[in-house]
Image (cartoon, helix red, strand yellow):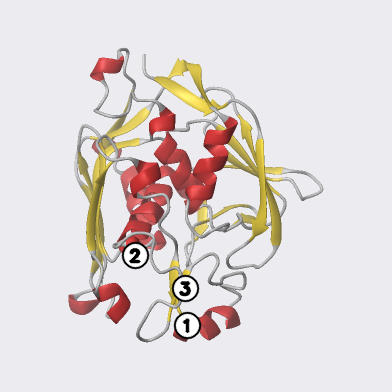
Amino acid sequence: MLQQRTIKSLTRAVGVGLHSGQRVELTLRPAQPNTGIVFRRVDLPEPVDIPVNAEAVVDTRMASTLGKGDVRIHTVEHVMSACAGLGIDNLYIDVTAEEIPILDGSSASFVFLLQSAGIELQNAPKRFLRLTKPVEIRQGEGAAEKWARLDPYHGYKLRFEIDFSHPAVDSTGQTFEFDLGIGNYSRDIARARTFGFTKDVEMLRSNGLALGGGLDNAIVMDDYKVLNSDGLRYDDEFVKHKILDAIGDLYIVGYPLLAAYSAFRSGHGLNNLLLRELMQRQDAWDIVTFDHVREAPQGFAQSALAW
């Protein structure tokens, strides 16, 4: 059968939150089969567990934030993206503050942590959420229109189109498609960094956001160009980061998807609305496992280390 995955040993990292600027320690720990991905605030008098699911998202301003009661964990999308990209089903993610560390602004550091801990196959069938009918969310009209959609597909692929009126972005690819069964997540997607504009920094910081952001953990642009001395990691790094975010946002549903995702100018908020719509449309999906590896979509049976 196609098996669930966790990590072999715990691994740690220390960094700062992109928006809070707070120092935070992150510990990734193995979890038993059928646990799912569970975030834990271990800095509180009584640790609080927040299992990922679409309803646990309580804020989508500039990031995906999970919550339970008054407890929050901000900016979960990059570590969730790494878990999805490496096929990790079960994991505890302990944090000592209210935000996941941004590290280098991509998911590559989380991929490294997971791979260095080792991937362990578990004696339980890997469960997928399979789309059986299309689900779509649209907002706005004309120049303000944006949308996100899931369609049935025997595998998992994502197609994203961005639309930024900025010289540095316009000169790069604005559309990209990534198929997890054909491409390599670690090579093709994981190194794409979050990005922002100097003109927005003052507004963001006045709203308590981007307090930990800088040239070491984001692509920063003025009105004309990229300010990072090392330039871009990919020719189309901007749209690839949007795909990285979408992979993380969609994995919050709690299962790897068998679906084709397509989006135009989407973001954390629209991605979460798409998941909530999906959950309400119980005729549009089912949960499946594969008794034989050969039945699984191309790429899903390969080693996690190759992803």
Q: Identify residue for label 3.
A: 229
Q: Alpha-carbon distance for marks 1 and 2? A: 16 Å
| Near-viewer residue (78 or 281) | 78
The total number of labels drawn is 3
Q: Where is residue 168 drawn, in percent x and y?
A: 31, 77
Up/down of 184 relative to 161, above or below: above
Q: Amino acid at mark 3?
A: Ser
Q: Which residue is mark 2?
A: 238
Dot 2 amino acid type: Phe
Ranked by sequence position, the earlier of labels 2 and 3 is 3
Is residue 254 depicted above or below 175 in this figure? above
- Pick the quarter of the image with the N terminus: top left
Residue at image position (36%, 48%) is 275
Q: Secondary structure at mark 2?
A: helix
Q: Residue at x 49, y 67 (%)?
A: 218
Residue 294 or residue 252, whichever sits in front: 294
Q: Residues within 10 Å of mark 3 (few under 14, many from 20)?
A: few
Q: Residue flagged by tag 1: what amino acid is it?
A: Thr
Q: Secondary structure at mark 3?
A: loop
Instruction: Name which quarter of the figure residue 187 lies in.
Output: top left
x then y, percent, for residue 261? 25, 48
Residue 36 seen: yes
Give the crowd class for mark 2: few <14, some 14-19, many >=20 residues within 10 Å: many
Q: Nearer the viewer, residue 188 or 147?
A: 188
Badge nearest the viewer, 2 or 3:
3
Please indicate, yes or no, whether residue 262 appears anywhere in the rendered image. no
Q: Residue at the spot x=28%, y=40% of the render?
A: 183
What residue is shown with label 1?
A: 198
Ranked by sequence position, the earlier of labels 1 and 2 is: 1
Q: Is residue 70 above or below residue 165?
A: above
